[in-house]
Image (spheres, grey):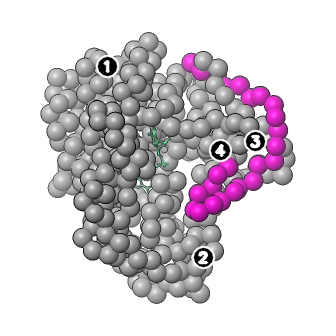
Amino acid sequence: MATWLYACRAMIIQPRIRGGICTTAHPEGCARHVRDQIDYVRARPRFAGPKNVLVIGASTGYGLASRIVAAFGARAKTLGVFFERPAEGGRTASAGWYNTAAFEAQASREGLWAGHVNGDAFSDEIKSESIAKLRKEAGPVDLVVYSLASPRRTHPRTGETHKSALKPVGRAYTSKSVDSETGKVTEVTMEPADEKEIADTIAVMGGEDWGMWMDALGQANMLAPGALTVAYSYIGPKVTHAIYRSGTIGKAKEHIEATAAGLTRRLAPVSGRALVSVNKAVVTQSSAAIPAVPLYITLLFRVMKDRGLHEDTIEQCHRLFTERLYGPLPAALDEEGRIRLDDWEMRDDVQQEVARRWERVTTENIAELADLDGYRGDFLKLFGFGLPGIDYTADVDPNVSPTL
Ligand code: NAD
C-alpha cells in the first residue's frame, strides 16, 4: 500500500479561475473535503457490501464518492484509476491528486487496503497495470464502478484521438445560461453537431471502453463470482434536453445504457451483472463545463434545498450502495432497466417549480430564485477552497506524493 510523503516547499494557494475552470487546488482543503465525505459515511451504519472494488475515475466527483462509500461503509479494498497531475515547479497538483492522497492516508490509518493507478484509463497499458496490481495486492473484484468523464479518448486499437463535443443534435439551440462567476444571465446559441462530432462523443463517453475494461478483467480471471459493474448516466429536465439528453452527450449516455445489457450477457460465466445508475445533477468539474447546465443546477439546488431534498455525490452514492446495489430488496429499475437515483430531482413538484423559475430568471432576480452562492461554494470546494477550518492565508506545501 502506498503511503504519502509531504515534502516542504511552502506557498500560499488561492483559487485561480480561468474560463470556468480552477487551475489551482489546495491540499489541506481537498483533504478536508474528503474527510467530510468519509465522516458522512462513518456516521452511518456499516453495510454488507463489496469486498474488492475497482473504481475507474476515482479521484473526484461520483467516482471518489463511490470509493469512499465502498471503503468506509463496507470496508472494501479499493483500487482507484484516474488521470491526475502531481505538483510541479510552482504549480499545485490537481484536486484529484490531493483527494487521493487524503483518501489513501485515511484508509491506511484504518487498515484498509487502497491502491491507485494514475494514467489514461482508455489505454491497454493502464488496464494491464491495474489488473496486475489487483492480482498482486487485492484479488478478483466483485464491483467495478465506471465513472470516467473525459473530453478526449485515444482509441487503443486505431490510435485515433476522439474529442467529445457538448452540442445539440439536429438543429441549433438557444438557451438561457449563467456565468457563475458574475451571476449574469444571458442567452447562448449552440450550433448542432455534425455526424463526426456525434460519433466522437460516443467514442469518448459511450460504453465501448467500459466493455473493454470488463472484458480485460474477465479474460484475466479477475472478476469474482457474482461481480457487479455500474456506470453512471444522466437524463435531466426538458430545459436541458436539447443540449444534454438529446444532444451529443445524451447519445453517448444512450450508448452506455445499451452497453449494459450486452455486458450482462458477457458476464454470464461469473454470473455477473452490469447496471447503469442515473444520478442527480451535482457540481463537478465535468458538469460545470456543459452549457446551460450550471443555470439549471443553481435553480434545482434552491428548490431541492427548500424542500429538504438536496444531495451531493456522497449522499447519492451512499443511497446507491445501501438501498440499491446492496440493499435488502432488489433494486427497483425503471422500464429501461436503469437504477434511478435522480428520483428526487425528477419529482413532479421539483421539476415544475424549477421550470417556473427557469422562465422568470434574470440577472436581476437570480439571487432570489436560485442558489448561486451554493453553486459557487460547491465549485470552489471541488478544488479545496472555502472549507471551514482551513487558513487560506497560511503557507502550505503543495508537494504531496505517494511512496510505493
Ligand atoms: P469528474 O470530472 O468529477 O470525474 C471524472 C473522473 O474521471 C476523475 O477521476 C478523472 O481523473 C477521471 N478521468 C478523466 N479522464 C480520464 C482518463 N483518460 N483516464 C483515467 N481517468 C480519467 O466527473 P463526474 O461528474 O463525477 O462524472 C462521473 C460520471 O458521472 C460521468 O459518467 C458523468 O456523466 C456521470 N454523472 C455526472 C453527473 C453530474 O451532475 N456531475 C450527474 C449524473 C451522472
Query: Looking at numbered disc 3 in the image, what kind of residue is underneath it?
Result: Gly
Image point (46%, 24%), residue name:
77
Give the number of the mark in front: 2 or 4. Answer: 2
- Magenta range: 1-24
Q: Are marks 2 and 4 in contact (CB under 8 Å)?
A: no
Residue closer to the observer: 325 or 208: 208
CA gap, disc 2 and disc 4: 25 Å
Q: Residue at x 60, y 38 (%)?
A: 85
Instruction: Give the camera-side residue of 168 and 98.
Output: 168
Which element is circle 4 on? helix
Q: Residue at x 43, y 60 (%)?
A: 281
Which residue carries the number 2 mark? 183
Looking at the rendered image, the quarter that the C terminus falls into is: top right
Circle 3 SS class: loop
How crowded pointer 3 is (Cα within 10 Å; few <14, some 14-19, many 20+) is rated as few
Q: Nearer the viewer, mark 2 or mark 3?
A: 3
SS for dot 1: loop
Residue beneath label 1, please?
222
User: What's under tag 1, amino acid-wise?
Assistant: Met
Q: Is residue 77 magenta?
A: no
The residue nearer to you, when weighing 61 against 84, is 84
Q: Which residue was labeled with disc 4? A: 30
Q: How far, Cα to Cα, is label 1 from label 3? A: 41 Å
